[in-house]
Image (cartoon, rainbow, N blue to C red):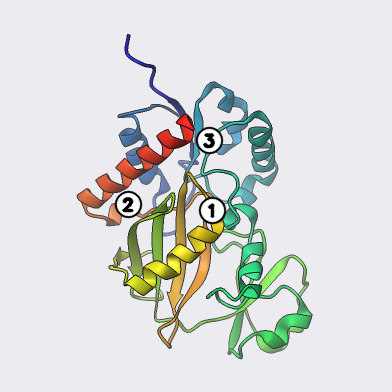
Amino acid sequence: MPPARPRVLYVSDLAYPARGRRYCDEDIFLTARLREEFDIALCHPLDAAALMDGFDAVVVRNSGPVLNYQGAYDAFREQALARGIRVYNELSGKGDMAGKQYLLDLTAAGYPVIPTVDRVADLAGLPEADTYAVKPKLGADSIGLEFVPRERLPELAYGDILVQPRIDFRYEVSFYFVDDTLQYALHAPRPAERWALEPYEPTDGDREFARRFVDWNAIAHGIQRVDACRAPNGELLLVELEDLNPYLSLDVLPADSRDSFVASMKTSLRGLIER
C-alpha cells in the first residue's frame, strides 16, 4: 500500500478585491501544483480554526488583511499554537505577521529601513521631507495610509500610528524567499504603478540587503517578501517585511521560474510536515 499523502489545508480569501492583482488566480495555480504531492482542501480564513485539526499542515496564503477579521485571526493563532498545528508560514514571524512594530525595532537597531517613529518626542529624529506617511501599526494593503505635512505631525494621535518621511524613491523592488533562499526578485520601474512589475536581476549588494532581514526574522519554513525602495542616492531601504501572506506575483515570472518556486515551496512544506 503506498504511503498516505500529506493533507494540507490551504487558507485563502478567493473573493478579496485586491487592487491591481487577482489573488484567486495565484491560489488556483498554487493549489493545482501542490496537489501533485499533497491532498489539498481550500477554505476561507474564517473557517481555518474549525477545520485545521484534520490536516498535517495549514498553509496561509492570500487570505487578505487580517484587520478585516482580527478576532478570528487571533483565535486561529492562539489555537494553532496551543494545539501544535503546523502552520506555513510558521507563526514565529516578527515582520508584518506581528504588526508594524518591527519597523521601529529595525530603525532603532540601525538597519537600512525608512526611518520610522511612533512618538511625538521622536519626530526631530526624522529627516526633513515635504510630506510624511502616517499609517496604523496594525495596517496592511495601504489601509489607513495618509500623507501629511510636517506641521500637522504634532497633532496626530500617537501610540497606534507610525510616521515616516515620504521618500522620493526611484523604484520599488521586492525579493521573494522560500525559507532562507532567494527565489526571484521583481521591481516596479514606474513609482506610480506599484503592481506593474517586471523581473529584476539583483546585485550581490541587493542580495545581502534582503538576506539581512530574512536572517533577522529567522523563519525556518515559510515564504517571505522583502519590499524595498531605491532612494535617490542609490541606497535600498526596507519598506515592508511581508511574512504573513505575501502576494507572489507568480504570473509575472517565466514558466521555469514558477516551476522552480513551486518545487522549493513543496520541499519547504514537506520539511515542515516531517520535522
Q: Are marks 1 and 2 in contact (CB under 8 Å)?
A: no
The answer to which quarter of the image holds residue 270 is top left
The residue labelled by disc 1 is: 218
**Coordinates of residue 65 in the picture (x, y in percent):** 57, 51
Q: Nearer the viewer, residue 269 or 240?
A: 269
Quarter occupied by the N terminus: top left
Residue 271 image-quadrant placement: top left
Q: Which sits in the foreground, 78 or 28?
A: 78
In this view, the residue farthest toward the top is 1
Mark nearer the N terminus (1 vs 3):
3
**Residue 257 image offset from top left, x and y in percent:** 25, 52
**Number of the front mark, 1 or 3:** 1
Whole-percent x, y for residue 93 in the image: 58, 51
- Give the SS element for disc 3: loop
Question: Distance of mark 3 from mark 2, alpha carbons?
Answer: 21 Å
How many other residues sit within 10 Å of disc 3, few (<14), some (14-19) or many (≥20)?
some
Residue at the disc numbered 2: 250
Which three-letter amino acid code belongs to the residue tagged 2? Leu
Q: Which mark is residue 44?
A: 3
- Cα separation, mark 1 vs mark 3, equals 27 Å
Amino acid beneath label 3 = His
